[in-house]
């Protein structure tokens, strides 16, 4: 009986050792890469921080980062981490978007290689206090197909309406059964997509802001009807719309 118990204990020990070794091997194979490295005074103490954009590549999915984060090595000796969503690409820019005289951390993450959705992040580290400044929300709009092979986009913030001629696609729409003799068989909405691009822009001599792009599509992602650009500036703790631009695609 004692011999059997001893064999069981030895087996359990060997299994545990194998499990621990396996976990260690996985951790060794999980390599963190530095995407970019920059330096700036983010806190206002007159000393520069080191700002690193890092990612952990997915071992099974090529050109994909399963973990992305920003690491700030503070001049006070502390490390500040800002987790981001996973994605195929990531970028980081240091720019004063809240106009307090200090650089903020603005980051983009492309969720997949199709470039159809971009996640944006904006943080301040003034006085070593981590503050999420957020980014503007996409514009809300009512978008739909109209009779006569047309499309209409109406912006919610100002009520402006834009009409688009789609006659160059009428054969395609007719084959799919959406139109009959130029009339819609049933009401159909367009797809208003989230931001697929956001970049820093100079609004005027004093102000720097953000410009985001949204695509409005028809029956598929490739059926782009229009691009809607919105320009924003940060004022008194919130984002305000400066101008919008709607263009046919």
Image (cartoon, helix red, strand yellow):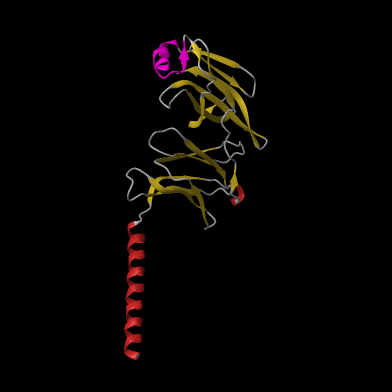
- Rendering quarter of residue 156: top right
Seen as rendered, the residue at the extreme bottom is: 2
Given residues 94 and 108, the one toward you in this image is: 108
Total marks placed: 0
**Image-based side of 11 in relation to 123, left or right:** left
Seen as rendered, the residue at the extreme right is: 236
**Image-based side of 67 in relation to 133, left or right:** left
**Image-based side of 189 in relation to 30, left or right:** right
Any magenta on residue 83? no
Given residues 233 and 158, the one toward you in this image is: 158
Give coordinates of residue 48: x percent, y percent.
51, 48
Give coordinates of residue 243: x percent, y percent.
59, 22
Given residues 225 and 149, the one toward you in this image is: 149
Instruction: Answer whether residue 164 is visible to the viewer in this image.
Output: yes
Report the residue at 60% width, 46% height from top: 131
Instruction: Answer whether residue 199 is visible to the viewer in this image.
Output: no
Give the prevailing secondary structure in the magenta stretch.
Answer: helix
Report the residue at 60% width, 37% height from top: 98
Range drawn in magenta: 167-180
In which quadrant is the N terminus drawn? bottom left
**Image-based side of 236 in relation to 198, left or right:** right
Give coordinates of residue 119: x percent, y percent.
49, 38
Please say if 248 is above or below 210: above
Any magenta on residue 169? yes
Please say if 3 is above or below 52: below
Give coordinates of residue 244: x percent, y percent.
57, 22
Report the residue at 64% width, 19% height from top: 159
Please say if 19 is above or below 232: below
In which quadrant is the C terminus drawn? top left
């Amino acid at each position: 009986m004692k011999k059997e118990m001893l064999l069981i204990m030895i087996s359990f020990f060997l299994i545990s050792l194998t499990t621990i070794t396996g976990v260690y091997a996985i951790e060794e194979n999980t390599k963190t890469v530095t995407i970019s490295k920059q330096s700036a005074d983010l806190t206002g103490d007159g000393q520069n921080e080191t700002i690193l954009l890092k990612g952990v590549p997915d071992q099974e999915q090529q050109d994909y980062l399963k973990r992305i984060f920003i690491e700030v090595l503070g001049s006070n000796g502390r490390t500040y981490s800002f987790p981001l969503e996973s994605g195929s690409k990531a970028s980081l820019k240091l720019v004063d978007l809240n106009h307090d005289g200090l650089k903020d951390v603005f980051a983009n993450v492309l969720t997949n290689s199709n470039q159809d959705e971009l996640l944006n992040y904006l943080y301040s580290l003034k006085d070593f206090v981590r503050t999420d400044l957020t980014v503007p929300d996409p514009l809300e709009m009512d978008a739909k197909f109209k009779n006569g092979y047309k499309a209409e986009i109406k912006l919610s913030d100002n009520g402006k309406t834009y009409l688009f001629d789609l006659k160059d696609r009428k054969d395609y729409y007719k084959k799919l059964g959406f139109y009959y003799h130029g009339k819609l068989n049933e009401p159909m909405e367009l797809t208003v997509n989230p931001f697929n691009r956001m970049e820093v822009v100079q609004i005027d001599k004093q102000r720097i802001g953000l410009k985001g792009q949204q695509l409005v599509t028809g029956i598929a992602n490739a059926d782009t009807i229009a691009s809607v650009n919105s320009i924003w500036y940060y004022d008194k703790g919130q984002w305000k719309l400066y101008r919008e631009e709607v263009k046919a695609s």
